[in-house]
Image: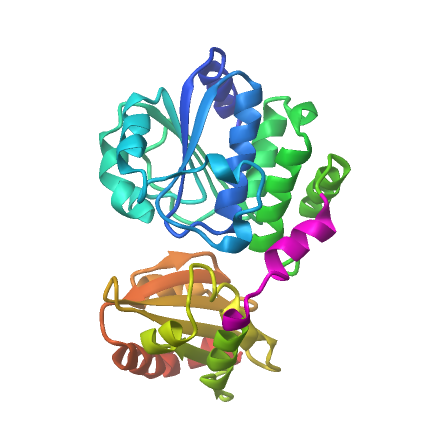
Amino acid sequence: MLESQIAAVKSYLSQPKKIVIVVHKNPDGDAIGSGLGLKHFLQKQNHDVNLIVPNEYPKFLKWVPGNKDIVNYEWENGKSKGLIQTADLIFTLDFNHFSRTGAMQTDLEKASADFIMIDHHQQPDDYAKVTYSDVSMSSTCEMVYNFIEALDGLPAIDEAIASCLYTGIMTDTGSFKFASTTSRTHRVVADLIDKGAKNTLIHQSVFDSNSFSRLQLLGIALNNLTVNEDLRTAYTFLSQDELNKHSFSKGDTEGFVNYGLTLENVIFAVIFIENKDENIIKISFRSIGDFSVNEFARAHFNGGGHNNAAGGRSDDNLQKTIDKFVALLPQYKEQLTK
């Protein structure tokens, strides 16, 4: 963070404030971890803090310390609106445009509070008074650690905060295997372990808590896998009927897209997931190396994210969406085969 940003944040937090923390729709480990980690820290500084999530999040994150105090905008709409309207300060974590909060967007746009953004996605919007944006960071949780450090707050990190931040760093780095994982990331993680994060237990809680139906659904996704060896691409899909048949719940498809990248010589992996409730196809893109799925998603599927991990959507049906994707691939032959 810049010295001017640190000074501005210290000024905002110099007196007790009513603070709201907001994360993106369909929260993942980094969103929940950064949101709760920051909430715990700010509460230790005598602020009145609430974390609001736009909608439900995966069961495998329901153990994270402070989970029971999260306000769900979808289920607690009146309470959420009131908290936003009366907030003195709003932190937005792990997203850079209000549209990423779904139905919350209008309430955030109307809010009278000042905003502080902490995020590692590309092309941040300009709504915040303080924008701490760094696309090179492994995760928003690592940025929250840096934020706390800039405020001379590392001694305040206890087991709860450490567990929250460790969870987000672990999940957003693919258990520390993605290219965004730096030596600094490992030093941060080591400090979090020293401060009480039980790394083995956290890993088990997130990754080793599968339901039988989720593993069956994974089998369907793997059975649907198609590989284009010439273009080093693998893609799969899950229809709404397949999701329903295997009792799909929020978070069940988390990580499925990464299996394509485990194939030898594949550098581009995609999963298409039909969502008839919203009448869209949700798409996850992953890549290895220099191929930018962020640019690909922005150009063709109303999405974006990071160079090696991005999301998108399509208003066409499942088959038309897949056909469009397959037809686009030859345009990227040079990038995919170099």
Q: Is residue 102 above or below residue 147?
A: below
Residue 311, image x and y in percent?
A: 39, 61
Is residue 124 part of the magenta span, yes or no? no
Give the residue at x 45% y 25%: 49
Is residue 210 part of the magenta span, yes or no? yes
Give the residue at x 29% y 77%: 318
Is residue 317 left or right of 202 when viewed as pictured?
left
* Colour setup of the view: rainbow
Which of these two is toward me, 108 or 207?
A: 207
Q: Is residue 21 above or below residue 332?
A: above
In which quarter of the view is residue 50 placed?
A: top left
Residue 174, image x and y in percent?
A: 60, 59
Is residue 85 left or right of 212 when viewed as pictured?
left
Give the residue at x 47% y 14%: 11
Give the residue at x 55% y 48%: 136
Is residue 275 left or right of 23 when viewed as pictured?
left
**Camera sees residue 312:** yes
Question: What secondary structure prevails in the magenta region?
Answer: helix
Q: Is residue 159 above or below residue 31?
A: above
**Camera sees residue 3:** no
Segment tinted magenta in the rendering: 198-214
Which of these two is toward me, 273 or 227?
A: 273
